[in-house]
Image (cartoon, helix red, strand yellow):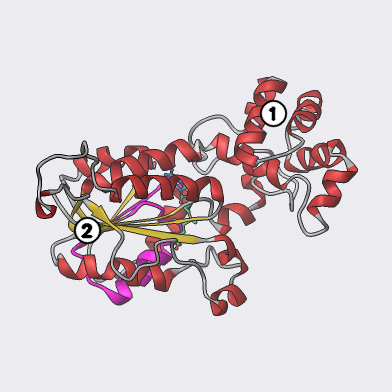
Amino acid sequence: MPEFHVSVLAQQLCDAVAPAIDAHPDGVVVDATCGAGGHTHAILQRSRPARVILLDQDPAALAHAKARLAGAPCPLEFRHARFSTLGAVLDDLNIPQIAALIADIGVSSHQLDTGGRGFSFREDAPLDMRMDPTAGPTAAQVLENIEVGELADLLRRYGEEPEARRVAAAIVAARPTTTGALASVVENAMSGRARRLLGKRIHPATRTFQALRIFVNRELDELDALLEHGPQRLCVGGRMAVISFHSLEDRRVKRRFTELTRAPELPRGLPMTAAELPRARFAIPAGFPRRGAQADQAELDSNPRSRSARLRVIERVMP
Ligand SMILES: C[S@@+](CC[C@H](N)C(=O)[O-])C[C@H]1O[C@@H](n2cnc3c(N)ncnc32)[C@H](O)[C@@H]1O
């Protein structure tokens, strides 16, 4: 049986949050993307938080992680929840502040590799693509009613598909309901030039699948909610670490972290000494790469999925 999910950048992530956990022996860690529980497992090998709250919108991931992490050295709380409900989950648990928040954005290998979940064109299956199979419309239901213009816009925005209009028109004409049917509609719709540009290693439907998945799961809105709320919950000295897998996500993480780590601007010429100038409440931890951390050669060799992963970290330095 293939592994449920191999965690990426686990060492770098543990190193990044360890000082925050070590400095707060009563501190709570939130793992916002529980998945197979791999990152929490790695953290527990290295640090001793008082408690870990694990969120996932996929009940299958939570069940797997619960079994894997049984016997953990500290209390664990598993919640079937989305990023956008993080505040409500913490309020419900009476946790005003946390020492660390980790998030490893996107789909797990288990979700991608389970044919029946409808994320991949490698196996023909109903076009589902929901990370949370208990809620919201499936990708097939989205395609049932969507108009060409709206679909083209979505393919452009979330898939960066250069032939968005042409692909959208073909999809709307066929309204496919399985992964195999969608993949062949897209492949047949694309111009020979576009297919040649992609080369042999990238399937012509890759960008369409990515765009639909992002739309079905509201991935960017969810990420924005996490980036908005997560930092507010950190205690002083607390850290937030986010791993993203493509530029649409990383751009958002970078923008938000830059905004948080920039000192508030004041009108020029105010009579203030350097010490009186307001400072930003967040900072990139000393020694952590400003452009984020990426996989080293050993990890790239053992887990090709790590190629596009980038870890960014901020620390709360002022109340
Ligand atoms: C890449 S996997 C995490 C793997 C995990 N870090 C590990 O090491 O095993 C991402 C997980 O996050 C979950 N997820 C993605 N977006 C989410 C959201 N908005 N709210 C809650 N869970 C989400 C997915 O269901 C998936 O299980």
Amino acid at pointer 1: Ala
Considering depth in this image, is 25 or 250 the residue closer to the camera? Answer: 250
Q: Which mark is residue 281?
A: none
Residue at image location 39% in from the left, 62% down from the top: 290
Q: Which mark is residue 238?
A: 2
Q: Position of residue 6 (x, y in %)?
A: 52, 67
Q: Which mark is residue 152?
A: 1
Residue at image location 57% in from the left, 59% down from the top: 109
Residue 97 falls left or right of residue 220? left
Q: Is residue 152 visible?
A: yes
Q: Which stretch is magenta?
A: 31-58
Q: Position of residue 132 (x, y in %)?
A: 49, 41
Amino acid at pointer 2: Gly
Under tag 1, what secondary structure?
helix
The image quadrant that residue 2 belongs to is: bottom right
Residue 302's place in the image compared with 286, above or below, is below
Residue 277's place in the image compared with 100, above or below, is above
Residue at image location 48% in from the left, 47% down from the top: 251
Residue 279 falls left or right of residue 167? left
Considering depth in this image, is 304 or 113 the residue closer to the camera? Answer: 304
Under tag 2, what secondary structure?
strand
186 in magenta: no
